[in-house]
Amino acid sequence: MGRIEDTFARCKAEGRSAFVSYVCAGDPDGPTSADILLALARGGADILEVGVPFSDPLADGLTNQLAAQRALEGGMTHEGLLEVLRKVRAGTDKPLVLYTYYNLLFARGLEASCAALKAAGADALLTLDCPPEEAGDLLAACAKHKLQAIFIVAPTTPPARIAAIAKVASGFIYYVSRAGVTGERSDLAADLAAGVAEIRRHTALPVCVGFGISTPAQVRAVGEVADGVVVGSALVNVVAANRASPGKAAEAVGAKVRELAAGLERRP
């Protein structure tokens, strides 16, 4: 098994869901973002989701848009991304999932992109704007370079389309907890458990829930119904609050992930 499968098997054996963290590579700068990712790994994140900064992040709310903007304005490049991945991979064996957009891969060539990302330590791609019907070339490149291809299911996705997504997905299914873009929310969707159950009718892959999860109580609640809990904006906000003192950013994010991941302590 690969790192992702191993992680979910370990978490299942421990009687808990996996904690999936998200931050943007290059925010507030490349070296600091690598330190932040390593702090997340040490603090309790089981899977590290790494945002690839993009000028048109259509799936992201304001918090993550600003993170991408800071990274790009700070000079983050493709080679800089690879350097961040290499540094993180040298410091942890936890899975690295690239949260990206199709144009960033296509512009450099799908084969070349996948080869470079795999060599730098990536385990999977979550390509936000690539629907399964158009994913043939990307799936082939991922398979050749042993990258898993993660797809998103939304609350509005009909059963037939969930089945189509499940046929091509690997690693896990990312279930968006509510319609809209990323960002902290004060409550969880009322139909969350039903949405996860519907996905499980079509696949044996783990189901991770993200978008809007920002408190220990929300992490705990989602962990009761999902195989993984994704937290992004709540962590990115900590990075933003400490961007004037990058040396403190990793420490602050590490403390935040420990607070949030405590909701997933082993259940009896």
Image (cartoon, rainbow, N blue to C red):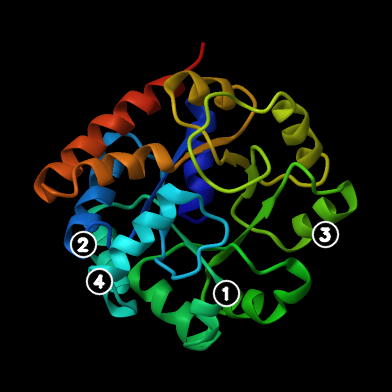
Up-down: is 195 above or below 140?
above
Where is residue 116 drawn, in percent x and y?
39, 80
> Dot 1 lies on which element?
helix
Q: Which mark is residue 83?
A: 4
Q: Amino acid at mark 4?
A: Glu
Query: Which callout, 4 or 3, points at the residue further toward the start of the chain?
Result: 4
Query: Which callout, 2 or 4, points at the residue further toward the start of the chain?
Result: 2
> Dot 3 lies on which element?
helix
Q: Answer whether labels 3 and 1 touch (C-beta < 8 Å).
A: no
Horizontally, residue 243 falls left or right of residue 109, namely: left
Q: Answer whether labels 4 and 3 touch (C-beta < 8 Å).
A: no
User: Which residue lies most toward the right here?
Assistant: 160
Where is residue 215 drawn, in percent x and y?
44, 24
Query: Disc 1 marks which residue?
Result: 102
Q: Amino acid at mark 1?
A: Tyr
Structural crowding at the residue carrying mark 2, measured as other residues with C-alpha within 10 Å and reported as few (<14), some (14–19) or many (≥20): many
Q: CA distance from mark 4 to mark 1?
A: 21 Å
Query: Which callout, 3 or 1, points at the residue further toward the start of the chain?
Result: 1
Of discs 2 and 4, which sits in the foreground?
2
- Tell me the quarter of the picture where residue 188 sits: top right
In the image, 93 versus 247, the foreground residue is 247
Q: Which mark is residue 164?
A: 3
Query: Which callout, 1 or 2, points at the residue further toward the start of the chain?
Result: 2
Of discs 3 and 2, which sits in the foreground?
2
Of discs 4 and 1, which sits in the foreground?
1
Where is residue 64 drawn, in percent x and y?
42, 52
In the image, 67 versus 247, the foreground residue is 67
Structural crowding at the residue carrying mark 3, measured as other residues with C-alpha within 10 Å and reported as few (<14), some (14–19) or many (≥20): few
Of discs 3 and 1, which sits in the foreground?
1
Query: Disc 2 marks which residue?
Result: 29
